[in-house]
Amino acid sequence: MNLNKKWLIAAVVTGMAVTGSAGVYAGAKLQQIKAYLNHSIGVVVDGTPYWLKDGNGKTLTPITYEGLTYLPIRSVADALDVPITYDSVNYKVRIGSGADTAQTPGTSGSTPVESTLRPVNLPKDFPIPGDAIIATTVDTDADGVKKAAFSYSTQESLDTMGFVYSEYVRIKRLENASQTVTSTTVKITGLLGGTSPVSITGKPSTARPGFTIFTITWSES
């Protein structure tokens, strides 16, 4: 087992949920730089100290580069209560007007906008890789029954994520199970804990070479 798999299964065993708060690199023009985590800078919003956090609740640190200080844009938008959406098709971050016109998870109509946000009603320990680009189609809590349906693309391999999901459903006691996990496909269905239907499918992406696509559906009962 390689180190990557060891890290991922450790996250599953300890109940840690990896969200898509890491940067989205698909199609990006990256340039390596030397920057510094600046622990001396704090953020105050309307007179109240504010700790910037990622999707996992982990505190983030400002970065200083060539005399300028950079803050994580989603955390700042959340602090100011400004809508923000990542448009993965055009590789743009949309802030404010226009960002909140995307389809609301759980509604129908337009094609869901991809982002780095995991479905709110998905179990917190459900593994999603850090580089995931997520498109949510269902994210509801109707009549006290939580449901989530979404797809995501990732550069993690089918082997790696297949192993992670196999271990996750084993730990969660998947009943009425059907599992196929290979280097070219992942198909897992059954009842988590004997009560919660789940379907996990994965395959290589044809639109994004080097990426895999996973489709997930889950319900409390």
Image (spheres, rainbow, N blue to C red):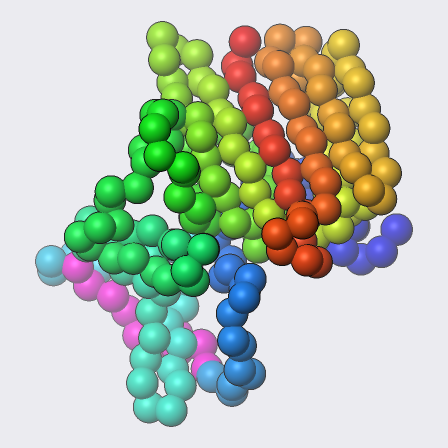
Quarter of the image with the C terminus is top right
Q: How many marks?
A: 0
Q: Estimate the x, y position of residue 198 in percent, counting from the top left.
A: 63, 20
Q: Residue furthest bottom?
A: 66
Q: Is any atom of residue 16 visible in this view?
A: no
Q: Estimate the x, y position of residue 122 in percent, counting from the top left.
A: 50, 29
Q: Tell me which residue sits at (38%, 91%) in the image.
A: 66
83 inside magenta stretch? no
Q: Residue furthest right?
A: 1
Nearer to the camera, 130 or 39: 130
Q: Tell me which residue sits at (43%, 48%) in the image.
A: 115
Q: Which residues are magenta?
A: 36-45
Q: Is any atom of residue 84 visible in this view?
A: yes
Q: Estimate the x, y position of residue 90 in percent, counting from the top left.
A: 41, 60
Q: Tell me which residue sits at (47%, 20%) in the image.
A: 147
65 in relation to 29, above or below: below
